[in-house]
Image: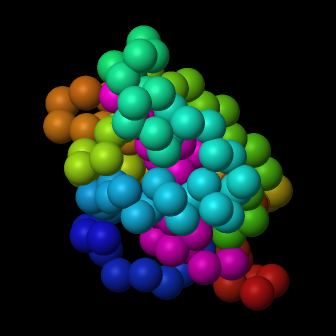
C-alpha cells in the first residue's frame, strides 16, 4: 500500500476542516480470496470467472466491503488515526472494482465537534478517474486530554 502520510495519531485538537489523507492499493486475486475467507462471503461473482462472466459485471469483481475496508484503513491509521472509534459510515457503491485495479481511498475532514470529540469525514474511493465508492463517516477522535 502507498499512502501520503505516516501512520499514527492526529488528536482532535490538531484536526482542521479540509485535512485529507489517502492510500493506494492494488487489489489482487489473493486479496479477494482472503476477504472471502475472513468474511465467509463466497459469492461466485467474486471467485468464479465462468459464473461472473454471465453477470451484469461481465467478470469477477472485488467485494464492496473490501473496498470500503480501505477507507477504514485510512481512518484507523492516518486520519484521525490510532485510537479512533468508528461511530457510523454511509456507503454508496458507484462502480465495480476488479482484480488488478488500483484503488485510491481518500478521507477528508468536513466537520469537527470538539465538545463531543466527533469528526465527520467525507470518504471516497476511485479507480483512475472513476469514483467506485463514496460516503460519509462519523468517528470519535482521540484527544490529548483523555487518551
**Residue 53: which quarter of the image?**
top left
Q: Residue at x 34, y 28 (%)?
A: 59
Measuring from the top left, give residue 71's x and y in whole percent. 50, 53
Query: Which quarter of the figure is the N terminus placed in?
Result: bottom left
Left or right: 122 as drawn, with respect to 5: right
Measuring from the top left, give residue 43's x and y in whole percent. 62, 37
Measuring from the top left, give residue 99's x and y in whole percent. 31, 47
**Residue 58: which quarter of the image?**
top left
Colour scheme employed for the rendering of this structure: rainbow
Front-most of residues 132 and 139: 132
For the record, the magenta segment spans 59-83
Front-most of residues 9 and 95: 95
Measuring from the top left, give residue 73's x and y in whole percent. 51, 65
Q: Residue at x 18, y 37 (%)?
A: 128
Tell me, yes or no, whether the highlighted magenta stretch contains residue 70. yes
Tell me, yes or no, whether the highlighted magenta stretch contains residue 21. no
| 91 to 68, vertically: above or below | above
Residue 92 appears in the picture as rendered? yes
Q: Residue furthest left?
A: 128
Front-most of residues 66 and 53: 53
Query: Which quarter of the figure is the C terminus placed in?
Result: bottom right
Q: Residue furthest top?
A: 56
Q: Residue at x 67, y 64 (%)?
A: 38
Left or right: 127 as drawn, with respect to 6: left
| 79 to 63, vertically: above or below | below
Q: Residue at x 59, y 45 (%)?
A: 65
Q: Residue furthest front?
A: 50
Amino acid at each position: 500500500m502507498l499512502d501520503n502520510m505516516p501512520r499514527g495519531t492526529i488528536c482532535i485538537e490538531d484536526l482542521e476542516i479540509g485535512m485529507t489523507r489517502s492510500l493506494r492499493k492494488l487489489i489482487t486475486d489473493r486479496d479477494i480470496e482472503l476477504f472471502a475467507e475472513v468474511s465467509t462471503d463466497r459469492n461466485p461473482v467474486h471467485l468464479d470467472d465462468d459464473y461472473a462472466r454471465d453477470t451484469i459485471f461481465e467478470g469477477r469483481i472485488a467485494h464492496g466491503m473490501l473496498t470500503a475496508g480501505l477507507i477504514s484503513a485510512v481512518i484507523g491509521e492516518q486520519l484521525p488515526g490510532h485510537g479512533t472509534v468508528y461511530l457510523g459510515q454511509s456507503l454508496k457503491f458507484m462502480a465495480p472494482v476488479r482484480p488488478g485495479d488500483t484503488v485510491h481511498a481518500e478521507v477528508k475532514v468536513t466537520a469537527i465537534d470538539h465538545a463531543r470529540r466527533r469528526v465527520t469525514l467525507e470518504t471516497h474511493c476511485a479507480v483512475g478517474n472513476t469514483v467506485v465508492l463514496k460516503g460519509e463517516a462519523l468517528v470519535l477522535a482521540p484527544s490529548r486530554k483523555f487518551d
